[in-house]
Amino acid sequence: MKMIIPMLLVSAFALTANAEEKKKGEKPQRKGPPAELLAKFDKDKDGKLDEAERKVLRDAVVKKFDKNKDGKLDEQERKAMFAERAKHAKGKGPKGQKGPKGEGKKK
């Protein structure tokens, strides 16, 4: 349970679906992790994050947002993480898209 939120964050970055409408008969394409995450965490430069690289990313997320240093993210720390994520993603996703547990504002 301790690592679910950071894993969801990684999954959200790694498994973002193509925002374009899919064409009839075609499967939607998936995008990889954002370029800034690959630049920082893709040590073998293969264009994707393997399990070890994802663990380093999760650990970095926990270290950055775990203000009380208990090794996990509590509700307040998760809200801060999602707020920063939303700030960086502003203008990149569909309007009105909500974050985990319905957090976020419709525009």
Image (cartoon, rainbow, N blue to C red):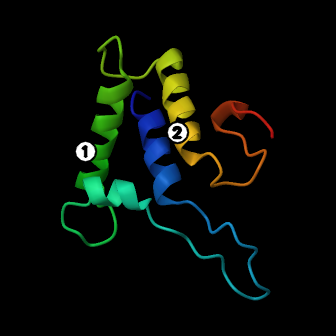
Residue under the image location 49 percent in, 43 percent down: 8
Residue beneath label 2, please? 85
Q: Amino acid at mark 2?
A: Arg
Residue sitting nearer the eye, 52 or 97: 97
User: In what element is the residue under mark 2?
Assistant: helix
Residue sitting nearer the eye, 18 or 4: 18
Where residue 42 sits: x, y (%)?
Answer: 26, 60
Q: Amino acid at mark 1?
A: Val
Residue sitting nearer the eye, 32 or 51: 32
Q: In screen coordinates, is 6 left or right of 51?
A: right
Q: In screen coordinates, is 29 left or right of 98?
A: left
Q: Quadrant of residue 55?
A: top left
Mark 1 or mark 2: which comes first in sequence? Answer: 1
Q: In screen coordinates, is 44 left or right of 11?
A: left
Q: In screen coordinates, is 39 left or right of 89?
A: left
Residue under the image location 63 percent in, 36 percent down: 100
Q: Quadrant of residue 71?
A: top left
The residue lying furthest to the top in this view is 68
Where residue 12 sits: x, y (%)?
Answer: 52, 51
User: In what element is the residue under mark 1?
Assistant: helix
Residue under the image location 52 percent in, 39 percent down: 85
Residue beneath label 1, please? 56
Quadrant in which the N terminus appears: top left
Mark 1, other Cα within 10 Å: few <14 / some 14–19 / many ≥20: few
Residue 90 circle label: none
Mark 2, other Cα within 10 Å: few <14 / some 14–19 / many ≥20: few
The CA distance from mark 1 to mark 2 is 18 Å
